Image: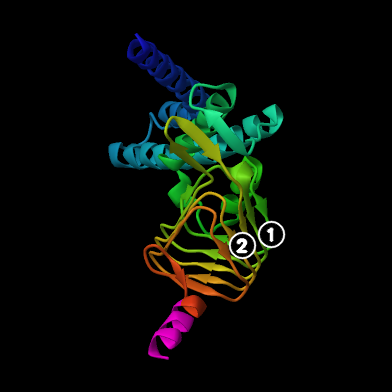
Amino acid sequence: MKWLFMSLTQLAASVTMYLIGTVFFGVALIPGVAIFFSALEHSQGLPVLARYAVLGLSLAGGYFLFGLTLIFLVGMVRMVLRIRLKEGNHPIFSAEAFKWAFVSALYLLVNFTFIDFILLTPFSNIFFRMLGVKLGKNVQINSKFIFDATLLEIGDNTVVGGGAIIIGHIVERGTLKLRKVRIGKNVTIGSHSTVMPGCEIGDNAIIGASAVLRKGTKVEPRDIYYGIPAESVKNRHKGERDAQA
């Protein structure tokens, strides 16, 4: 019976998320739909090709308006509800896990539809701040895989490379584990690297491309980590010298 309860609970949660997505997409589409129908009405007397051009431009403009509306809608809902994730270990069927699933679903609405168009623009940092990231000045984020925003801190002048994954949660043995990720100033997170929950990265450190930083890793300032799993260049060189000795 336990498996049946879990299946029904997952089904109910999935349907709930679909309904939430319908509401958010529907509201965000209103300005774009209004523009399209206005263009449809006012272009009736134009030649066919000119009318197609007007309608095409209205659809394209409506899409971008939809995306910008969606990111502000999602961010404002998170801010108004003051949703912040709590560090700790939580049962997978708990209030904290549901809260995590809800804010994750909100982020995925943007992630799957529009976020690629705002990366490395001012809209990106505005969006991540609205989601709850403690973001320093002049941070450059070129990845849409930035999860668990309220558990993330990024210092001034840090660069997050394309495709990098920064994540503040992990599920182990039916338990949702939430941990903060702290990234200092002037840090470089290489493209397609992974920063797991609980990691702390000191100022001026470098995480190499495609490196996988294991959960709870503490990176010293100015250190360089690379590899799978990622290891400190300092420690690796020290080990090589000890082996030669």
The residue located at (42%, 33%) in the rendering is 173
Residue 152 in the image: above or below residue 24: below
Q: Position of residue 167 (x, y in %)?
A: 50, 48
Res. 199 image quadrant = bottom right
Q: Is residue 182 magenta?
A: no
Q: On the rendered image, what quadrant is the N terminus found in?
A: top left
Image disc number at residue 139:
2
Image disc number at residue 136:
1
| Magenta stretch in the rendered image | 236-245
The residue located at (46%, 34%) in the rendering is 109
- Residue 37 showing in the rendered view: yes
Q: Label 1's element?
A: loop
Q: Position of residue 171 (x, y in %)?
A: 45, 37
- Residue 35 showing in the rendered view: no
Viewer-side residue, 206 vs 93: 93
Q: Position of residue 114 (x, y in %)?
A: 45, 43
Viewer-side residue, 74 vs 168: 168
